[in-house]
Image: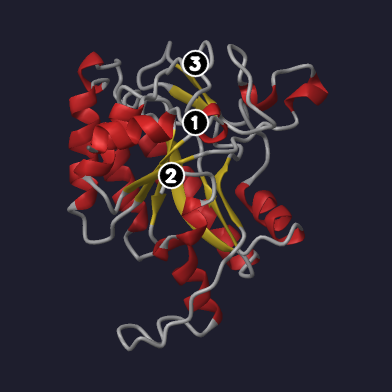
Amino acid sequence: MWGATFVAASPLAVAAPAAAAAGGERGRGSGSRRRAWRAGDHHVHSEYSGEFDTSTTPPTFHKGADAVYPIVTNAIMAKHFGLSWAMCTDHGGPTHSKVNLELAYPDLLRSRALVPEVFQFWGMEFDAPALDHHTLMIPHHSDEARQLFELESRFAKYDAFPTDPGRNTEARMVEFLKAAKDMRHKPLVIAHHASRSATGLGVWGQDTPREFRNGNNAAPDVYVGFEGAPGHQAGPLLGRARGGYGSHPTYGGFDQMTARVGGLWDALLVIWS
């Protein structure tokens, strides 16, 4: 299955909040663990989607470039609008893995304490090798911060400073997914705004069906879908393209990979066969 709401149906996304509501780990392995559909958002930016001054070594991080709100503010608004869960998905950049570990993660822990009604996942908007951005969603566990640090510092294509072109290859993406698959706590990886770089209907951009198939083949329990209805839907109110799709538009807010009959779906069937 590939679509906008796939994450809502995954065991990671729904079982954890359900277990929390039912009293933690009760029912694990007994078949009594409750499952339910839970409204949530796996693509939320905070003030840690900032910018880096690369004139210094190491680069100097400044908060509040692409988003300005603290993590706890996002959680409060998630609660206000009825979400059961949300996650931090801030942009990466040179040495951003250290920013995540040392600055952003402690703020997430404070946010969890202040807004316990919203199950808050840790993760990032991953600079996927050879692809557009992806959600990298870490399961809730005691060593989640180190797990994200390991994956981002090793594989995010822009984390190295100076930039390492060798990170930005399809082979590197498959290597990342295989490493994630072999972890004790498997993350989820979900493509963002998959056709935002496309220049026309049926013209693939950075993300292609072949790469989706290769990713799912490499790690079927990790590489599970894409954003079928991307964010930035209110772009036209600010004079911008809906969804940020400046080269070719969305269709009623839906990525062409979702909206088009045939297209991606037929391509995946052909690749599968």
Q: Name the residue type under label 3.
A: Ala
> Is residue 156 shown to the viewer in this render?
no
Dot 2 or dot 3: first in sequence order is: 2
Give residue 12's position: percent from left, percent from top: 41, 62
Is disc 1 in contact with disc 2, using a CB cutoff of under 8 Å? Answer: yes
Left or right: 70 in relation to 131: right
Give the number of the disc on residue 2. 2
Quarter occupied by residue 213: top left
Left or right: 50 in relation to 130: right
Label 3, secondary structure: give it: loop
For disc 1, the marked residue is 257
Q: Name the residue type under label 1.
A: Met
Q: Name the residue type under label 2.
A: Trp
Label 2, secondary structure: give it: loop
> Is residue 75 shown to the viewer in this render?
yes
Give the number of the disc on residue 79. none
